[in-house]
Image (spheres, grey):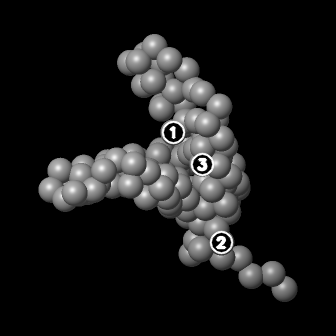
């Protein structure tokens, strides 16, 4: 159980670091170019999907088993963190489009976790 929590924590940290790095790059693009927020909407969504997938991949690779559970747990931790920030900071809950995005985050992180277990170096050979 402790190993699973550690793996999900590493995945969550990876997700948060990737999202912060992408936010920095996108904000610099918005500041120093003629791009608008509307023109980068789908880029932002794609980068967030990629971040959750990679976070699930990292948690699955570190956990080496039950990748679907590790990836799903990583995504649920991220969604819970976003919900807490939104609810406590802005006094609002998720709307229907946010539920859809977080469901896709969950699906992508689960797929990433499954792939991460398959990419892990802990392979068993069966005879």
Mark 2 lies on a secondary structure that is helix
Q: Is residue 61 visible?
A: yes
Give the side of residue 84 with respect to residue 101, left or right. left
Q: Give the structural element (helix, strand or loop) at label 3.
A: helix
> Which numbered disc covers residue 118?
2
Residue most toward the left?
Answer: 32
Residue 60 lies, in percent from the top left, at: 59, 59
Dot placed on the residue nearer the N-terminal end, 1 or 3: 1
* Label 3 to label 2: alpha-carbon separation: 20 Å
Q: Is residue 22 above or below residue 77?
A: below
Q: Residues within 10 Å of mark 1 (few under 14, many from 20)?
A: many
Is residue 44 found left or right of 71 in the rendered image? left
Q: Quadrant of residue 76?
A: top right
Q: Which residue is at 71% across, 76% downward?
A: 124
Residue 78 image label: 1
* 90 horizontally vs 68: left or right: left
Give the labeled residue for mark 3.
105
Expressed as whole percent of the image width and height from the top left, the position of residue 67 reads 67, 57
What residue appears at the point 61 percent right and 61 percent down from the top-left corner? 112
Q: Residue furthest bottom?
A: 127
């Amino acid at each position: 159980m402790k190993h699973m929590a550690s793996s999900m924590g590493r995945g969550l940290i990876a997700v948060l670091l990737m999202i912060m790095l992408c936010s920095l790059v996108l904000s610099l693009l918005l500041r120093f170019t003629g791009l608008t927020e509307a023109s980068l909407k789908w880029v932002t969504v794609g980068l967030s999907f990629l971040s959750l997938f990679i976070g699930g991949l990292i948690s699955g690779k570190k956990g080496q088993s039950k990748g679907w559970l590790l990836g799903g747990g990583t995504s649920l931790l991220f969604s819970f963190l976003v919900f807490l920030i939104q609810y406590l900071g802005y006094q609002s809950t998720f709307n229907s489009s946010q539920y859809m995005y977080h469901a896709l985050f969950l699906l992508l992180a689960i797929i990433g976790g499954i792939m991460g277990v398959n990419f892990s170096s802990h392979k068993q050979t069966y005879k």
